[in-house]
Every structure is written in C-alpha cells, then in structure tokens.
Amino acid sequence: MNSSMKQRPIVAVLLATTMIAGLPVLPAMAQDAPASTVAAPVSTVATLGTIRSIAVTGTQRLEPDTVLSYTKLRIGQSFTQESLDQGLRDLYETELFADVQIRNDNGALTIEVKENPVINRIVLEGNKRLKEDKIRPEIKLAPRQIYTRSKVRADVARIVELYRRQGRFAATIEPKLVQLDQNRVDIVFEISEGPKSKVRQINIIGNEKFKDGELRSQMVTKQSRWFRIFSSGTSYDPDRLAYDQQKLRQFYLTEGYADFRVISAVAELTPDKQDFIITYVVEEGDRYKFGDVKVESDIRDLSGDLLTRRLPMKKGDWYNAKQVEDTVDTLSETAGLFGYAFADVSPDFNRSKEDLTMGINFRIANAPRVYVERVDINGNTLTQDKVVRREFRLAEGDAFNSFLVKRSKDRINSLGFFQEKLDVEQKPGSAPDRIVLETNVQEKSTGELSLSAGYSSLERFIIAASITQRNFRGKGQELRTSVNYSAYSKSVEVGFTEPYFMDKNIALGGDIYRRDLNSFRFLGSGTNNRDTTYEQTTTGFQIRAGVPITEYISLALRYSLNFDDVTLDRDTYYSDPDGTGPLVERCDPLLAGRYLCDAIGKRTTSSLGYSLIYDTRDNRIRATRGRSATLSQDFAGLGGSVKYIRTRLNAAQYVPLGAGFIFSLTAEAGYIHSLESQRLDPDGFPTEKIRLVDRFFLGEPQFRGFNIRGVGPRVKRYFLEGTTENGTTTYERVTGRNNVSDDALGGRIYYMSRAEVEIPLGSGAREMGLRPSVFVDAGAVAGIKDPVLTNGTGSFAGYCDPTDAAPTGSTRVRATGTARSPMCGTNYSFAGGNFEEEYLGDTLKPRLSVGFGVNWNSPFGPFRIDIARALLKEPGDDTKLITFNVGTQF
C-alpha cells in the first residue's frame, strides 16, 4: 500500500473467506434483508393495504425515482409481505446497494438504501512471481465502477486460477476494502503466492511388462528431486497430466501393445498444499506383431510394389505405431517429390486377435499433380519481400516439390531475421491442381548495439562497443562496426556485406581494420603471471565475393592486403654488445630468445584466397541436422614481402538424437607452406621460413582443457643458480614456478576434432538461454624447424665455435660457463642472469580432453563456461581446468 493511503485515516475491513474446493473465496454477502427489518414469511398472502406513498432515503449518487424504478411497487397498488420481499430482492439484484430496508407505516412505504461505494483504485500487493501486467487483464473491476462483493469474489477466483496455471496451488488472495471519503473505496488484493506445487510421487498401477522408472522416463512430468533444480517438469500442471497419458499410450504402441489404455489418472494435493501425488491405473493388453504390410497406389507415377519393398517394417516384426506414422509421412513426402501435394495416404488396419498380428495396407489415393500458383509472405514489416522470396527454391508456376519447400524453409531460417517458429503452409489454390505457399514470419530484432565491460580468462578485463545491423534497410545487408579493448588486444573494424549484389546471386563485402596485439607468455607453468613479449600492429583491408555453384556448393573469393609491424621493447630485449652506441643496438637473443628476434620487422602481406563450401545444414546459425565442409586456400605473394600457401579444411556433422539431444562432430586441419628462400639471421643462422605471427596456434578457447596457445612447440627458459666448488662452477635450475618463462612458437601444421552432445533442459531453463553440453576435444600442432637455443651464461648453442665453423642446433642446452659475444670472439659478461632453454612439444601425437560446458545468454551478455580435463598431453603442454568468457560477444 503506498504512502498516500497511509496518510489519510482509513478503516481496513477484512472480508471473511470460506473455503470452497480448497480455495479462498468471498462468502455470499447479505443480499437478503435482515430478519429484524422484514417479517418472516407467513403462510397467507393477505393484503396489507394500499400503498399511499413511497419515500426513498439514503441515496447519494442515484435519484429516488431511479431507485423506485428497480422495484414493482407503485402508489395506489395493494401490497403484501411477498411483494415487499420481492422489492428487496429486485434492489439487491442491481448490485448497486450494500444494504436495503423497506418500512411500512400504514401504506406509507419508506425505502432506506445504502449505496455501494465507487472504486477509487485497485491495488495489488505481494505479487512477485506474476507481474501486474499479467494479473490486471484478468481483473474485471476497475476505477469508477460500482463496488460489489460478487465482482470481488469473481476477481479473486480469476487471480487464483492464474496462479494455478503457474503451478502455485497454495496461493491465497485476501481482498481488503479501504474506506475513503465521499463513499469511495480502494480495493487491495493481498496475495500470498506460496511455492510452486511440485510432484512428490508418480505411482503407476497395472504395469507388468515395464518398470515404473521406465514409464516415468516417457512422461514430461517428473518427480521432484534435488538434481532437477533446473527442470520445469517437476511442477504440477493439469494440462501435462493429459499429455502424459498420451505419452504413455504412444510408448506402449511403439512396443506393440495396441490395446493399451489408461483407465484413470488422479492427482491428489497433499494436505499442506505443497505437493501432488499422481496415480495412473493402466491396462497393458496383448502384444502384437506386424502381419502383411503393403502399399497400394492409385497414382501412376508411384509404384505400389516398389514402395512396398522399401517399407521399414516387415511381417513378423513387433508392431510399432510410431513407425506406421513415420511411414505415412514418408509416403506423403515421396508423393510430394513427384508434385502431388495433396496425396492422401491412409493406412488400413487388419487386426487379428487370434494370432495377435496387425496387417496394414497403405493406400495412396489418386490426386492431381500440383503447381505453385502463388507464394504469399506475411508478417514481414521491416524485411522486404524479395529478401524472403529469393531464398525460396520454388517460384510461381513451378511443379510442387515437398523437398524444395523444406529446403526453402531452412534457408529462410538461416537468415536469422525471423523467429525460429517459421512455417510454410500449403493451401489449396484456385483449382485442384494449384497450391498456394503461405509463409508466415515473425520478425525479430536484427540490430545490436553493444556497450559492455567484462572479464575474460584469456584477456582479463575487456571493454567492447559494437553496432551491428544484420538486416540493414530491410535488404538483408550486414553493416558492422566494432571497437574492442583489453589488456592484450585492441581493434577497430568496419565491415559491410551485400548478399545479393545488384539483385544477382552474388555476395560482395569488405572489411577495413586496425588490430593491435600484445602477445604474452606465462611466467611459470600453471600460473596466470605473464609478461608482454612482442607487439604486433596490423592495418589492412579485405574484399570478399561469393557465388553459388549448386544448391549446396558455393565458392567464396577474397583478397587481403595487410601491413604488419612486429616490435619488441628496446629497453627490455635490445643490447649493445660491442658498446659502440645505439646505431648497432639490436635484439639480443640472450634477452628475448632467438625465435622472438626472428619475428620482429615490418612486412606487407598481399594474399588472394578462395573457399569451396559444401553445406546442407538446416540452420547455419544454430544447426540441428546436416553437414558442412570447407576447403580454403590463401596465396600470399602477389606483391608484398611475405610468400606462402595456407590450406585449411573444416568439416562438421549434426545429428538429432531425439528428445532434444543434438550430436555434433567437427574436424579441422591446416598446413602452411613457405614460398620464400631460406633466410639467415644477423648472426648467420638459418631461421624458420614461416614467421612466428603467420603460424597456427592451438589452445584456449578452441581447444578446451588447455591454456591459450597451450598446445604444441614451445621454448621454456629456466633460470639457473651457480655453485662453485674447487674452482668448478655447476648450474642447477632454481625451483619454483615463477622461475620459468614459456613461449609458444606455433606450427606449420595442425589438426583438431570435437565430439559434442547438446543436452536439452526444461522450458524454464530454455527461457533463460541455458544450453549445456558435454564434449571431447582432440588435436595437435607441430612441424617447425628446431630453433637455435641459448643459455644465459653467455654461450650460444651452435653459435660461433672456433673449432667448428658450421652452426649446429640443439633441442636442449646446458650452461657451459664460456662467455662469447653474438659477433663471436669477443668475451663479455651477461647481466641478465643465468638460464637454460628447452624446446618441447613439436609432435603430432594427439592431445585429448573431456569436459562439459554451459552457454548462457545472460542479461549482461553471452556467457560461456567450460570445465575440461586433459587426458592426453605431451611434455611442455600447458593445461587449464576452467575456461570462461563473459561480457563481450565473439
């Protein structure tokens, strides 16, 4: 109740309630006159006299004549006790009065009335689970109406029914009347919502062939248990009770029990009104097998004998009603493939109770071949008709084909412009051989304005701003701009895509971008301590074009021009070994590692690429069935300073497992081959032809269970501590995780595969946007030249050795104590401390991880959390148990 109500003197009158069928309702109000006012009925109907006058008192809003008009009492008429009682009833039936009395003084009648008050306002209190916008449409009382108890009682019943539909059978509604001046009232509905009524127990009586648990698993309604906290099926719903009976019948019919029936289904509310106990009484009956099954076709294009041989059921198989239904659908679709949209397929059953067989004759009635008369599109207010029509695989005048209708529906769904419940209805046209395809769409928001801050286990704090319109101007065009900032990456990007350039089936698009990446390495295996290694700045653009080759195969072409500048911090990684000044200052392999020194420099990459795409998925955004495969190659070297061929192959398969489970199997692989001649570093050592920033990396987030860049070739630098005894110095690694740095080097070849099962949840969890899954990931990356390693005592493994002019590489270097300059021959002291390096992980042996994850479309942005454990790994790999991202879109 608001403060304004509390400031004025009020009197709250609690209306008494009675219990009817377990629900609080208002009792019948005093609609009969008090006994003291009207005499008890007598057995006679003697006349009391003649009405000499009639006076009306107590009115406020009504005129006395109006009150008198509601009765049959008139001056000059004779009257009896019965006519006075009828007058009272007539006035009460108007529901305008709270109290009525008729007094008789020798024919001078006085009608005393007390008018019902006028409603000032309706107040709801205590409703949290049901918002006011759900309750108020059910309330018939409204401000400025005349208050009546019967209307209040009706509104209470309506509100209670609303809560019943929500499964809250313990909800109570207590109406209160707040008296105001001028005969006005506020009506306050005090609501006690109570908990949702759960299903405590489901009992099944009469089942002998199947256990209770097996039958309960077929039902939508589930018993309330602690592990079903996210399930909405544990709440009692009378509509689901009827649906579960159908589910039981369907289950038995699929198992061959054609005579099965549910004798009764009773739901009992426990005395505390918290839970329900449901009891089913069933009769299983006998189990049947298929008898003779055949197809008879009256359509000349469909051979009954050929279709009979293709039937999934055979004589002697256990009868399965679901298989029969699916066969009817399959035969209808087969007729639709030949253009017979309205073919009538009806199964004729021949049941034999003697040998318990069910013979079926599928009869396909004759029907005319149908042509598409018209394609209608309804519901699109922003999207232009042509955007939808160009996804149709059928046009006006084409022969009807049910497969092409389904394909059209899938393509429209893949646009992502409409709600998922899209339907293409088939309606009769102007003639028997004509059909109208009516597409009813419901548009959803395709524009996104995102201003978000979040936290990523990869990039720490993230700030992102983006504007994306996937249906720009209703033409299906995509326009996007984005700005992202985090501790390790920054980017600005603008892109545009026209899917049908000049209304031709040619996609054209482009992007302009600037990306700054601060690569990092972990200091200590298994820790989150890291420091920045190289900084990469990329400025460039890309132009794309795509054309379809067939319905399921398309070709995409692209050209990219990138300007890259890779740098290292001069104060940290540069040195002047000769002491001759900054002009000869350069990257010091002792400080940075030779692999990082090889990466720095400015480069221009001009590349031309293509992708050959095969895609049969039902939805490109969120597929549930179908497969896809993509072969991509990029050729760098059309000018610029970088030359290579990069090849990638991606494939995916989606299979619905039933009951909402979706299985997906994805695989990808890549290889990059250099077209450049061998390069030498400033010390004359050969370097890896594929530069560090062009290689493949594997790890979080695509390979769960491993840290970012946690799989594959890497160099670990361990800090050493020297001990001198008898003039001999020996070096040992300093213990502790923070005394090792970890640099991932990437590889020229990689592969990865994933098997994942998406687990369906109840409707409540789906409304929250929760999509859990379990998965298995496997993959590896390898294939680079062994890097030249260093040790921190000043020696360079394989560097310049006076006894051996040929440089040699090493996969592990121990400190030798001999200090040499990078120029070879000049001794110098290295102040950076002693260390040794180790090269690990360059193998294609598979790494394997298993885990589970949850996608959540949270109110503050997409959230993904994965918990994965690495089962197979190689020395040097960096594992991670929990990965999450929140607050930004990918």
Image (tube, rainbow, N blue to C red):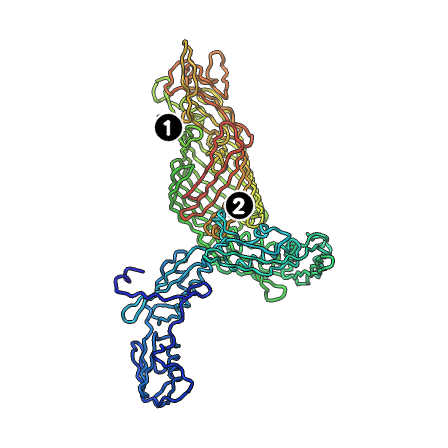
Let me know if residue 66 appears in the view. no
Are the residues flagged by discs 2 and 1 in contact, CB closer than 8 Å? no
Residue 352 location, x and y as percent?
A: 72, 60
Quarter holding the N terminus is bottom left
Does the rendering let one see residue 449?
yes
Q: Distance of mark 2 from mark 1, alpha carbons? A: 46 Å
Point out which mark residue 758 bears: 2
Q: Amino acid at mark 1?
A: Asp
Picture layout, residue 604 above or below residue 725: below
Where the C terminus falls, by quadrant? Answer: top left
782 relative to 217, above or below: above
Mark 2: give few (<14), some (14-19) or many (20+) Cα within 10 Å: many
- The reply, left or right, for residue 767 in relation to residue 190 is right
Q: Nearer the viewer, mark 2 or mark 1?
A: 2
On residue 243, the disc is: none
Residue 401 pos. (x, y %): 62, 56
Of the pair 163 and 195, the residue shown nearer to us: 195
Quick one: 778 or 515, which is closer to the camera?
A: 778
The residue that mark 1 highlights is 569
| Mark closer to the chain start, 2 or 1 | 1
> Is 736 placed above or below 380 here?
above
For the residue pair 713 and 153, the one nearer the viewer reads as 153
The part of the image, by quadrant, that contains residue 596 is: top left
Q: For label 1, count other residues whose C-alpha is less than 10 Å away and answer few (under 14), some (14-19) or many (20+).
A: few
- Callout 1 secondary element: loop
Q: Label 2: state its secondary structure.
A: strand
